[in-house]
Amino acid sequence: MIDIFKRWISHSKEQDIDDSQNPWAGLASYEDPETAERKLKFCGRDDDSYDLARLIIGNVFVTLYGKSGIGKTSLLNAGVFPELREEQYTPVSIRLGRRDEEQPQSYQTMIVEAVKRVVTRVETINVIGEQQDQQSLDYLWNYFARHRFYDKYDEPTTPVIVFDQFEEVFRGHRDEAGTLLRQLDYLNDKDHTLDICEVDGQSYRHEQNFRFVVSIREDDLYRLEDSIDNCYLPALKRCRYRLRSLSEEGAREVILIPGKGLFRDEEQDQIVNTIINIVRNKEDQSISTNLLSLICNRIFVEYQRRQDLDHINQALVDNFIKDNPFEHFYNEATHGFSNREKNYIEDHFVDSTGRRNSLPESDFLLHVKNGSRLLEGNARILQKISTSSDGSSNRIELIHDSFCEPLVHLREKRERRNRIKLIATIAAIFIILLGIIGSILYLYSRNQTHEVTIASQKKTIAIERDSLKKANNLLDTMKSAIRQKEEELLLKQQELEKINEEYGLKQFALAQKTEELYKYETMYEVDNENNINGADMNITYIYDGIKYPRYGIFKPSDLDNWKSLNEEVCRKKIPELLNDSLKTLDINDEMIESDPGLVYLILKSQSLSTIHDKQEWFNLWYIMNEEQVFKLYDILTRERYKMSVLQYRDKAAMLNNEAYRYARNGDFDTALNTIEKSIEMARIAYASKYDSKGEILLMKGDTQEAVKMWNKVLEIAPDFLGYYGSTPFYEQLRKRGLVGKNTR
């Protein structure tokens, strides 16, 4: 392996490789083609680019999230930005977390200045007075309302402000992040558009001439969730796009489209399969986007070094894999590091079972002086995966499991060298002792006549024998320790196999639960049975005779509507509840008469679980103002609504799973009856339920009815594919030519 590494380094020195000809970016992100020096082809994400661009065009605020290293920045720069420009939108990418903390600008100033830098011309419209207070809720809205923006063709354009790596703003700046989110929520509200008015003799109407996109790592999404919840901005939870791992078809495009002409037709399929298998994750079978680009980039470098080849062939790829490319890349990335720094990396980033381990960033940089070099550019073998609870520090890990085996191999090789040195030292001592003993015996045979000398030599021999015995005992102890370590290692390997098996089962169960959760999240709810249409609230369920709005009460007019619908029913149910375990409560008759709805909700609440909790709220009623009463209504109606919906959803989900089981066994009549029961049990029209029914009809062979079910899905949820991306039922219809690729 040392010879292979020397050959790798010598090749790099002998021949200067022109990286500008490399069609793959390696570990670097793909850049915006309008400003990039290297015009690389961004492939494999056409559907994601189109769908995300459409989502941004149709909505003011969009959240893009995905795992670290999955390619969010590349998708935005090279995929979405060109799509937006074709629709007269101007992308403006900002890293708010990279501001100068010694002389920091406000986030609002950074946004305004970034827009001015990117658009060609900004025209001021004095339709309203200028807002000077940057912390004011309407500051950003005021700026966009007072300006028109023009592109390089002097045509009106809409800026799309993209906050890349938004998780950085939560590191010690949560208050600023909260203020920014409140301003974005204000921008997102269509009620804040201006009516048509006259400015300088011309008709002017301000609509939403802006778009905002937040790009954030999936393991940091909860930070955005917490900030949105703390500020009570539920509208910002809509319009989210999760970037999934690269599909196998997308991976083939990443290899073949930039590499057009580099492979022979008869070998390209085998080469593509070989490369994909290298970067496929062993646990979840996902394809690593960054490693795929890296492997292709390094294979092209090897191809350039080989002057005797006119194409990348299978033999070149096989040799590249055989030489352990990840160990080569690790050695190149850590070139110039001290042995102590390399030992630290090899000992700490892979645990004793050979799995990836993470370290605090501060500890890593303390022990590896130039460690930041491994987090960026073409030497990036490490990545930041999460931050501490206060957002002040990161944790670091390897970018992929494929680097674990080389690090374990290097660590074991180093340990073997140390063991060999130890054994050699002991052997040298043993040989020296044998020489000493031989010398003593020789002197003894030469000086038998000299009794004093003989006695002295015997004493020396005894001492040397004692030393030799101690050395032998030490050697036996070391052998015993080595055997014990080998037995412990065998036990740990057995434990690891068991853990891996249990982990696989848990991962499978988690995947099933996640799939069900996504189906529930996309339910479009209407109450067909009772035909209730509140003026300003969306009542979606009746539970225990009480009508509940969707997710709770949002404004006082909703509360008035709810009271008018439910107060009589609540007034009748209160005596029944007080005759139960709640009879010890002291409730003033005035409260029951004037606000029976609130009395009923407190009595039925499970979050107010004790008699003491409920009595406290009844005592506080006399001093509560309207806003406090409104908030209490909002909390309690949310609780009752969620309990009612979950009861029916669980039953409907069980029937849905049973329907699929009958269908897989060929009992399609029972399957269709069961899925109808699932729809009836839900009591509301779910697009996902009709998607399941259509898939069962397609399994049965009833194509005509299956297509009708797909039309039913789109009738209930026109943006069904915009949320899901795709479903097995839709993909089967598309492959059979029964629907178009971009059917919505």
Image (spheres, rainbow, N blue to C red):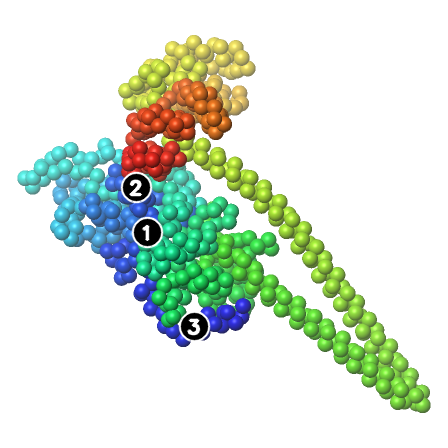
Q: Which residue is mark 2?
A: 51
Q: Judge from the rendering whether residue 655 lies leftward or rightward of residue 93; answer left or right.
A: right
Query: Could you tell me which quadrant the N terminus lies in?
Result: bottom right
| Figure label count | 3
The kind of residue tagged 3 is: His
Q: Which mark is residue 501?
A: none
Residue at 13% x, 44% y is 125
Distance (Cα) linking label 2 and label 1: 15 Å
Please indicate, yes or no, whether residue 584 appears anywhere in the rendered image: no
Q: Secondary structure at mark 3?
A: helix
Whether tag 1 and tag 3 are in contact, CB under 8 A, the answer is no
Residue at the extreme front of the image, as rendered: 266
From the viewer's side, name the closer residue of 488 and 275.
Answer: 275
Position of residue 229 measured from the top left corner of the image (x, y, whole percent): 39, 36
Query: Taking 208 as reference, is 102 left or right?
Result: right
Decide: few, some or many residues near mark 3? Use Cα within 10 Å; few <14, some 14-19, many ≥20.
some
> Which residue is the site of mark 1?
43
Which is more N-terminal, label 2 or label 3? 3
| Disc 1 residue type (three-letter) | Cys
